[in-house]
Amino acid sequence: MNAPSTWDRIRDPSEKTLAVLLLAPAFLLLALIVVYPIGKLIWNSFHDLRLSGGTGAVKFIGIQNYIDVAHDKDFWNAAKNTLLFTVITVPGALVVGLGLAMLANLPFKRRWPVRLALLLPWALPLSFVGLIFAWFFHTEYGVVNDVARRLGNAHQTMWLLSPGYAFAAICFAIIWKTSSFMALILLAGLQMIPRTLYEAAEVDGASKWQQFWQITVPMLMPSIIVALIFRTITALQTFDIPVTMTHGGPGNATQTLAMLIHATTIDYLDVGYGSTLAVFMFALSLCVTAVYLRRIGRE
Amino acid sequence: MTRSTLAPNRRFLLATLALAATLTASVSALADTTLRVFSGGANQRPDLMRKLFDQYTAKNPGVKIDIETGGATSDLQRQYLSTVLNAKDSSIDVYMIDIVNPAQYFGAGWLEPLNAYVGEPAVALKPYLPVYASADVVGDKIAAMPAFADAMFMYYRKDLLEKYKLAEPKTWAELSAAAQKIQKGEGDPNLQGLSIQGAPIEGAVCTFLLPYWSQGKDFNDAAGKMTLDKPAAVKGMKEWLTLMDAGVVKKNIAEVKTPDTVNEFKAGQVVFAVNWGFAWDRFSQDKDSKVAGKVGVMPLPAMDGGKSATCVGGWQWAVSAFSKSKAEAAKLVKFMASPEASKYLAAQGSLLPTIQSVYTDPEVLKASPWFKDAANVVIAGRSRPQSERYGEVSDAIRTTTSAILARTKTPEEGVDEIEGRLKRVMR
Amino acid sequence: MSTRTLDLPAAKSLFASPFEGPGLRLIAAAMVVFNGFFPALWILLTSLKGEAELVSKPITYWPANATLHNYIQAFTDQPLLRYLGNSFWVALLATVSSLIVSALAAYAIARLNLKHRQLILTAIVASSMFPLVTLLVPIFETMRSLGLLNTYIALVLPYTVLNLPVCTLVLVSFFQSIPKDLENAAMIDGCTRMGALVRVVLPLAAPGVFTAGILAFVNSWDEFLLALSLNSSATMRTLPVGITLYQGEFTFPWPIISAALIVAIVPVAVLIAIFQERVVGGLTQGGLKG
């Protein structure tokens, strides 16, 4: 037998070569676009790097930034808010998304209104979703208070001016926007479940709820995990909606980690400290999603 | 060929080459310099700036000017500029920046000092409004030159004051009494006595400083160190809360941004409104304005026993430190900051002049007669704290002020917080 | 198992949902439709109003004097069509690029026995765990040194990287759910691995591919920070950035901005309406035997 020629190796490569070829585009792009920025970011976090109002020089200060972050009450406040948003909106979006997906899956005569309604929240640019919902929750000009008034409730809640209500309003907006994302992924997953399983269960006399918990949920698990991973990562980076709805207010009550990073980097021009905060956010994201990732890798 | 016969040919060739090189050099020296100017959004009138640029290029044939508009608001601009200037980009030569930015941008090394091109501060800034001597100068370097000015005025419903035979209030207490009389008389539950900006926008810094300044207090000394008089600050914020309790200021004032005040006043829902200079044209000329012809403008009231004080706004021209044509850029900036340019902007766009003498120019007064009254207000106007770390200063003041107005913090707590945050920043 | 023809009552019970009865289902569906459409409807109505109407008390829903003036101004104040075109091309190119790159990577992760599978997966997902705002300056510098500022490529490349984690993971989970026997069968018949990927796996994972495609498209369509910094010239601006230019330091003309938003939403909505069938697939999913 002749040794395989290069052309043969390309046309029918060994596993190892194939792996390299398939992963190359992804890793080349990653190398080009994010490796240097992430490296620079980590490097920055070990330096005192203020563009303005500092000493002017870039000084190596070891882990001083990290120590400062650990003592920074703004950081802890933002971290607390971020985790709270995450804990509320991730399950929230999952539940709502699952409901939406299952509804969209039903055999209506005309399916497109439900499907379109499902995905339309996605079509609205994120930077304006916050502004629109801020309008909906506005004390005087908002639909929410108008409906409440028409239903007889004269008290006009100042939604965005009290920490608790503002939090709720922001969570509502986030769940509204992101449940489409979840629904989309779950819907595709639902399609992959063989209907024969349901038929068999039906024959065996299983109720709808039993079918749901014993067939739908387990079969949907891979999709659920994928949806959860990304919903969680983006929840930890919540920025656009709270910043346009309340600008972190009242006071700091709704300021998230991403908002703190944005302000530190762009408004305060403190690149060193901002980078340190970003590393903390990365560590947080990694910890939270590590469990999910392991499950996917295992299969 | 022998060497000797080559020599004349070679010399001829060299001579031709030298001539060609000289010609090319002199042609490229005559070639256009293209200056790229970063201008703001619609409120900074790029259309008028374009006309001024055309006037300039007519007088300076070797220069072409491109406008790049980006970032409609000060915040959006900073988002873009902080990336681009951080990367030391040389593609933009001249920037139009907010009046609060020179100290911070200069401290970041983004602006070219203009002393070499326009002169030393004492001389170069003399014709301009006094506020620019502190706003545009960092240390002893001129960081930017004024483009057009702005200030906060008190607009009011002349017709309503006349109807109830009330004089222009000189103190906040008088304003409160006048507003309440009108509100009770009109019997309209939607009529606000006074509209200010309580949302955590840049204007909220002014909302904090106005009652504070009018007690004769300073926020910082000439060196930039914070000199916050806490009791005075608390008293100032309590003034707003008192107006809220009296029903003069609406309870959700912490949701109100600049456009909201303008729209509500235009719709006839407000008696007194604090706003910037642009609002005058909106009130009197907008087609959907219900208050055209019924608007008066006056200096802001003072705290009891104090003096009226206002916040100065407006925009400045700066030369990028990374520009490849600094001299040309500086020359353009000098032109754009000149009395002629200021007069043009005032007459064509009702943009407040930066130079004192322009306020009394007959052409300008014909276009905007109200500038005669505006002059005193703007001349006495004060600049917000000039700090290399203005981002943090602004953030601390605006979010805390909004929280106090939203009643989630007491004035004492809020002022304590401002002091705590800014103590280290404004040293 | 015999193949059944689709009959509606039986089909209804196939999708074991807790929703009993057609009446309840219709109510639920109406709620979903309302939920999805209301904000867009609100924006549509606002785009027909004048700005003064927005401060009327009590608030109005239906415009008092409906006008198309805002749309005219939306198109004349800014080159809205140009922005639309830019966004469309960038999003399309980014989607194609994302799908190709992530499909290849996903196939490797799902099918090949990679030694460091976990690490590779984590590395791909980890890139999305840093807030973009902190990576802006180096990315800008990279694009500038490549001379790519103010081009479509300047955005397509980072968007591919931004979409990589989601698309790859979605495709991995879809590829994993397809039985290996099908590919093996194809390869025994003489197909190469790549051929098997293209001819067997991708068609079966079609819902996943279209899902990843829509995710990539909408993500790229929506993106703001990079578009603001990299494509700042007026001719290359994308829609999210362009829409912010209708406001001013002191003005926020909701009616005109709403008109621009409607112009921004409509193409995406149309695309979704067309492709939603593909995403969801039909009720009859071929090839998956019980």
Image: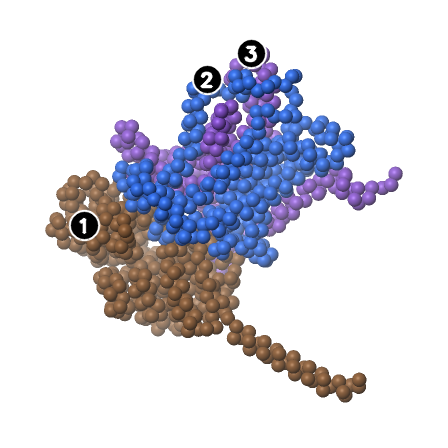
Chain colours: A purple, B brown, C blue
What residue appears at the point 71 percent right and 38 percent down from the top-left corner?
C194
What residue appears at the point 44 percent right and 73 percent down from the top-left corner?
B60
Q: Chain of mark 2?
A: C
Which residue matches tag 3?
A205
Question: In front: mark 3 or mark 1?
Answer: 3
User: Where does the C terminus of chain B fall, quadrant-wise?
Assistant: bottom left
Answer left or right for A45 relative to B222. Answer: right
Tell me whether circle 2 and circle 3 mark residues in contact (CB < 8 Å). Answer: no
Which residue matches tag 2?
C21
Q: CA distance from mark 1 to mark 2?
A: 64 Å
Q: Nearer the viewer, residue A183 or C130?
A: A183
Q: Chain of mark 3?
A: A
Q: Position of residue B115 (x, y in %)?
A: 42, 71
Q: Position of residue C3 (x, y in %)?
A: 63, 19
What residue appears at the point 18 percent right and 50 percent down from the top-left corner?
B175
Q: Secondary structure at mark 1?
A: helix
